[in-house]
Structures are given as structure tokens and as C-alpha cells.
Image (spheres, grey):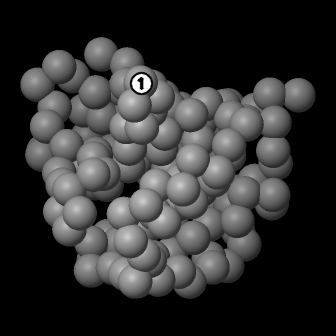
Amino acid sequence: MTRLFSGGCHCGWLGVRLRTTLAPSELIPRRDSCGFCLRHAARVVSDPSGLLEIVAPREATPYRFAMGITDFHVCPRCGCYVAASWADGGALFGVVNVNALDARDAFSAAPVLTDFDSETRAEREARRRLGWTPARIVR
């Protein structure tokens, strides 16, 4: 059974939809120790067998930092971080911030603390190929 978890930023300018066959209890949130994620209290999930749709106007400009390979989708109006995406050749992968989902309370598992600061670019990309959700941007 495919489940659909929808949501978006506080003002509705950015949207997200996660399609997955997994129950919220099977999607264990991760909390990265980087400054960006700490400041946004982010809890991200992904499903390599699912689909993440990031709904953004054409004029939306993602935020990049550090290695400069990840687009962080942050609303310029209300400041909410809804998702991150990463392009790998012709494919796009992403994670969704559980806090941006309407059913955020269904994801009740304590987040797993992560620290990716020591990863090389190649290690980071290999990890994402295995664990991030196939994604697309919907305009």
C-alpha cells in the first residue's frame, strides 16, 4: 500500500509530497549535527524505494553551503526548511524534513543523531545513492 505524506512550509509557498510504502514507524528520522540542521531542528527521512516531490515556484532559489552539492529548500517568506535535494547525473535524490509534513506527529521515533562532517564528497554521494529518496521538482 502506498502512503502519501504531504506538507510544506508555514506560509504554503513551498510544498512537499513523500510517496512510500513504509509506515511512519519504519521511517526513522535523522538529525544531523551540522549548524544548518541544528538551527532548523531538522528531522529528515528518506525512502530509497519511494518518491519525493518538492513543489516550488520557478523563482525559488535553494540554499547551498559547505560542499555546495546539496540544494536546501528553504522558504524565503517564512523561513521553513522543507527538504533537501541532490543531483547525481540525470537523477535527483532527496530527503524531507518531517517537521514540514502535515502528519509530523506520526513520526514519533526519536531521531538518530548523525555527523557527516568527516565524509569526502565521494563518500557522501555513495551514501546518498543508497539511502536518499528518488525526487523531482514540481513547478
Amino acid type at image mark 1: Gly
Seen at 28% across and 27% down, the residue is: 56
Relative image position of residue 55 (x, y in whole percent): 36, 26
Seen at 27% across and 80% down, the residue is: 35
**Residue 122 relative to residue 63: left or right:** right
Relative image position of residue 133 (x, y in whole percent): 59, 41
Query: Measured along the vertical axis of the image, is residue 11 above or below residue 17?
Result: below
Seen at 81% across and 44% down, the residue is: 22
Query: Measured along the vertical axis of the image, is residue 3 above or below residue 48?
Result: above
Circle 1 sits on which residue? 90
Relative image position of residue 113 (x, y in whole percent): 56, 83
Q: Residue furthest right?
A: 1
**Residue 90 relative to residue 21: left or right:** left
- Callout 1 crowding tier (Cα within 10 Å): few <14, some 14–19, many ≥20: few
In this rendered view, identify the residue nearer to me: 112 or 125: 125
User: Which quarter of the figure is the N terminus placed in?
Assistant: top right
**Residue 38 relative to residue 62: left or right:** right
Q: Residue furthest top?
A: 139
In this rendered view, identify the residue nearer to me: 21 or 87: 87
Task: Tell me if I can see residue 63 in this picture.
Answer: yes
Relative image position of residue 30 (x, y in whole percent): 57, 70
In this rendered view, identify the residue nearer to me: 108 or 33: 33
Query: Measured along the vertical axis of the image, is residue 119 above or below residue 59?
Result: below
Q: Quadrant of residue 73?
A: top left
Q: Quadrant of residue 52?
A: top right
Task: Tell me if I can see residue 78 in this picture.
Answer: no
In this rendered view, identify the residue nearer to me: 73 or 92: 92
User: Which quarter of the figure is the C terminus placed in?
Assistant: top left
Query: Measured along the vertical axis of the image, is residue 51 above or below residue 118?
Result: above
Q: Secondary structure at mark 1?
A: loop
Seen at 42% across and 68% down, the residue is: 42
